[in-house]
Image (cartoon, rainbow, N blue to C red):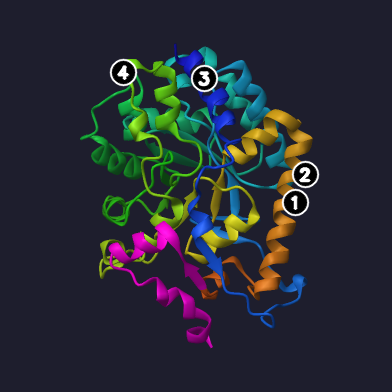
C-alpha cells in the first residue's frame, strides 16, 4: 500500500505541474523597477548562510519522493545533478524506509550519487527521536527536515488524525539530534503564530512551504475516488508562501520575543527564478523547489537537471545585478507592490503592504 501510494503521489504531483490556470501567490508581487539601480554582474554573490551551512545559491532541491523504483530513478537524477552543481537536496519522507527496509535503496541512492554534498533527510512530525536519528543515519544526512502534514493526513484514507503530540515530539527531536532540524509544511503554509510556537520549541529553521504548488489534499482526494467520500472542498486550502512571508512580519512572530537567529525558508509553487527573487525580497533566506524540478527529472534525467540548476543560478545572478542586489539578503531593500489576494491578506492580518513599496527610499 505504501509503495503504491508513493507512485500515486509522483503521478498526480507531476500532473498538477501542467495546470495552466492554478493561482500562484507570486503573481500578486510586483517589483518596482528603478532603471539606474543596477550593478555589475561580477559583483553579485549568490551564496547564502542557512544555519551552519553556506548554500552556493539561494535555492535548494526540496523533498519529493522515495520508496519505489520510480522514486529511485528520480532521486538518482536529482542527486547526481546536486553533486555536479553543489545545490543542496532534501529527500522525500524516509518513513517508508524506516518501516520497510527493502525500500531504503530509493533513498540511500541520494548519498551514493552525492557523497560529499549537502543532504537533508525527511520524516513526518509524528515520529520519535529514535526514528529521527535513524532517518539521519540512513542518509548520513547533514540535517533533518521534519514535515507537518495534518491536512494531508486528514484527507488521506489511511492517514493519522492524532496531532496533539506533534509539538512535544518536535521539541524532543530538536533537543535530541546532533544535526540541525528544519521544520516545514507540505504545501499548506506556516502562519506567524506557528512560526512563533516552533521558535519557542527550539526550532531555528523553518520552511513555510505554502500553497500553490503540489496540492496534497487534492492528491489524497483523487486517490479516494469521489462519491460521498469526497474532500474536494479542501482543494487549494492553505496560505501561499507569499502570504506566509507577509504574515511572518506581523506581531504574531516578530514581537519582542522573536529569536534573532531564526531563519525562514520558503517553498510552494516556485515556477522559475523570478519567483525565487520575489520570495527572497519578502524575507526568505533561501527557496525550495520541488514540483518544477520533479518534471525536469522525470522528462530529462540528470543532464537536464544539471542544465536547469545551472540556468537558475545564472538567471538569479543576472536579475540580482539588474535590481542592484549584491547579495540575496539585499533584495529585502527592493520596493514591492503587493496586490490581489496577498495584499488583502496582509491588510487583514494587520500589515500595511504600502510599507514594502518604499523600502529603497528608507535604505538610502
Q: Is residue 89 above or below residue 105?
A: below
The residue range painted magenta reads 336-364
**Element carrying mark 1:** helix
Q: Is residue 329 above or below residue 25?
A: below
For disc 4, the neighbor class at 10 Å (few under 14, some 14 to 19, many from 20) is few
Question: Sequence-wise, which precedes: disc 3 or disc 1?
Answer: 3
Q: Are marks 1 and 2 in contact (CB under 8 Å)?
A: yes
* Res. 166 image quadrant: top left
- Residue where numbered disc 2 is placed: 307
Which dot, 3 or 4, sits closer to the camera? 4
- Please give the label number shown on residue 8: 3
Question: Sequence-wise, which precedes: disc 4 or disc 1?
Answer: 4
Could you give the CA–CA distance between mark 3 and mark 2, rounded to whole angstroms? 27 Å
- Residue where numbered disc 4 is placed: 229
Could you give the CA–CA distance between mark 4 and mark 1, rounded to whole angstroms? 44 Å
In the rendered image, the residue lying farthest to the left is 164
Could you give the CA–CA distance between mark 3 and mark 4, rounded to whole angstroms? 18 Å
Amino acid at each position: 500500500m505504501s509503495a503504491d501510494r508513493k507512485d500515486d503521489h509522483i503521478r498526480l504531483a507531476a500532473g498538477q505541474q501542467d495546470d495552466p490556470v492554478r493561482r500562484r501567490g507570486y503573481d500578486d508581487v510586483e517589483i518596482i523597477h528603478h532603471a539606474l539601480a543596477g550593478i555589475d554582474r561580477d559583483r553579485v554573490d549568490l551564496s547564502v548562510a542557512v544555519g551552519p551551512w553556506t548554500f552556493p545559491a539561494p535555492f535548494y532541491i526540496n523533498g519529493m519522493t522515495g520508496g519505489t523504483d520510480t522514486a529511485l530513478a528520480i532521486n538518482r537524477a536529482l542527486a547526481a545533478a546536486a553533486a555536479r552543481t553543489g545545490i543542496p537536496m532534501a529527500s522525500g519522507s524516509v518513513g517508508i524506509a524506516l518501516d520497510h527496509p527493502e525500500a531504503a535503496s530509493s533513498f540511500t541512492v541520494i548519498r551514493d550519487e552525492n557523497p560529499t554534498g549537502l543532504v537533508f533527510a525527511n520524516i513526518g512530525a509524528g515520529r520519535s527521536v529514535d526514528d529521527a536519528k535513524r532517518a539521519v543515519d540512513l542518509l548520513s544526512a547533514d540535517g533533518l527536515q521534519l514535515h507537518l502534514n495534518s491536512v494531508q493526513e486528514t484527507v488521506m484514507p489511511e492517514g493519522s488524525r492524532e496531532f496533539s503530540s506533534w509539538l512535544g515530539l518536535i521539541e524532543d527531536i530538536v533537543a535530541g539530534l546532533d544535526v540541525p532540524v528544519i521544520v516545514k509544511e507540505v504545501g499548506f503554509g506556516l502562519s506567524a503564530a506557528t512560526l512563533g510556537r516552533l521558535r519557542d520549541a527550539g526550532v531555528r529553521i523553518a520552511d513555510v512551504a505554502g500553497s500553490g504548488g503540489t496540492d496534497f489534499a487534492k492528491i489524497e482526494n483523487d486517490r479516494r475516488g469521489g462519491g460521498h467520500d469526497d474532500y474536494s472542498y479542501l482543494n487549494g486550502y492553505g496560505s501561499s508562501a507569499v502570504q506566509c512571508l507577509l504574515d511572518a512580519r506581523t506581531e504574531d512572530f516578530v514581537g519582542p520575543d522573536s529569536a534573532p537567529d531564526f531563519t525562514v525558508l520558503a517553498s510552494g509553487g516556485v515556477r522559475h527564478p523570478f519567483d525565487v527573487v520575489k520570495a527572497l525580497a519578502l524575507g526568505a533566506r533561501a527557496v525550495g523547489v520541488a514540483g518544477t524540478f520533479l518534471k525536469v527529472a522525470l522528462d530529462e534525467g540528470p543532464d537536464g537537471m544539471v542544465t536547469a540548476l545551472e540556468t537558475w543560478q545564472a538567471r538569479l545572478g543576472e536579475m540580482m545585478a539588474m535590481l542592484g542586489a549584491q547579495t540575496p539578503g539585499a533584495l529585502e531593500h527592493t520596493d514591492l507592490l503587493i496586490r490581489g489576494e496577498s495584499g488583502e491578506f496582509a491588510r487583514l492580518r494587520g500589515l500595511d503592504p504600502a510599507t514594502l513599496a518604499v523600502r529603497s527610499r528608507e535604505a538610502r
